[in-house]
Amino acid sequence: FYAYSVCNVDKPDQDNWLRTTFIQRRPSASRVFVELQFIVRDCNSFDGASLTCKETFNLFASESDADVGTTFRKGQFRKVTTIAPDEITGRNELRINTETRVVENLSRKGFYLAFQDIGACIALLSVRVYYKTCPATVKSLASFSETVAGGENQALRKVSGACVENAVSEEPPRIYCTVDGEWVVPVSQCQCKPGYEEIEDTCQSECFFVFQAFLLLNLWYL
């Protein structure tokens, strides 16, 4: 497999950077998740050859309204977090770590991620960036469109829906989408119109079922 790696543990004052390409942001997604797979070498496996060896690296982010190409300025990046492995790799074993971090309060058209090494022996295997949504659904005879989950400053995102066909409500149906992509607390439930019956989140005409019963009855006598 392919990997980005660095292992300058015998050299002091390391400041190595790796930056992603421009990542376009969906306008309503102010919060994204960054899943990393990586390997970190155990500093003790170098037999004390380096007193400056590290076992962590840093995650940074920078927003932009346009792709700046290969232009790179460290000062434009803000630190998101320090990444530490749950397991370190020794001489005769390989330990792959998977860690997920959150980048909050995004507001521009896109962003870059960057990874800073300050003296570790690491290999970055994969980077997956995603956001969470509440999927399109029908609840209590109301349909709701797919909605991007809110961010740190909006734990619950209020969403308005519409009653299914042949259903009505005194007020527009509403529901809330959580930061974890789950629907909660439906408000103003819809009800089937007179002459219709609720069948599996739809409103079916009662006349249809009377006709079906009449037809079956006649077939039975035939």
Image (cartoon, rainbow, N blue to C red):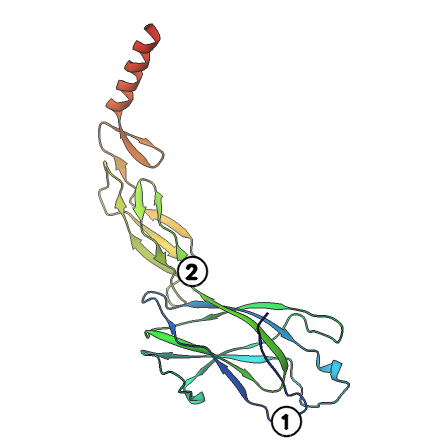
Identify the amino acid type marked 2: Lys
**Quarter that holds the N terminus:** bottom right
Q: Quadrant of residue 30?
A: bottom left
Q: Considering depth in this image, is 34 or 191 the residue closer to the camera?
A: 34
The residue wearing badge 1 is 12
Q: Which mark is residue 132?
A: 2
Residue pictured at 32% horizontal, 56% vertical: 158
Residue 97: percent from left, percent from top: 62, 68
Q: Considering depth in this image, is 97 or 1 the residue closer to the camera?
A: 1
Residue pictured at 28% horizontal, 49% vertical: 161
Q: Quadrant of residue 6?
A: bottom right
Residue 220: percent from left, percent from top: 35, 9
Residue pictured at 70% horizontal, 78% vertical: 42
* Outermost residue toward the top in this view: 221
In the rendered image, the vertical position of residue 180 relative to residue 73, given as above or below: above
Query: Tag 2, which secondary structure?
Result: loop
Residue 195: percent from left, percent from top: 22, 27
Q: Considering depth in this image, is 47 or 150 the residue closer to the camera?
A: 47
Q: Are marks 2 and 1 in contact (CB under 8 Å)?
A: no
Identify the amino acid type marked 1: Pro
In the rendered image, the vertical position of residue 72 relative to residue 102, given as above or below: below
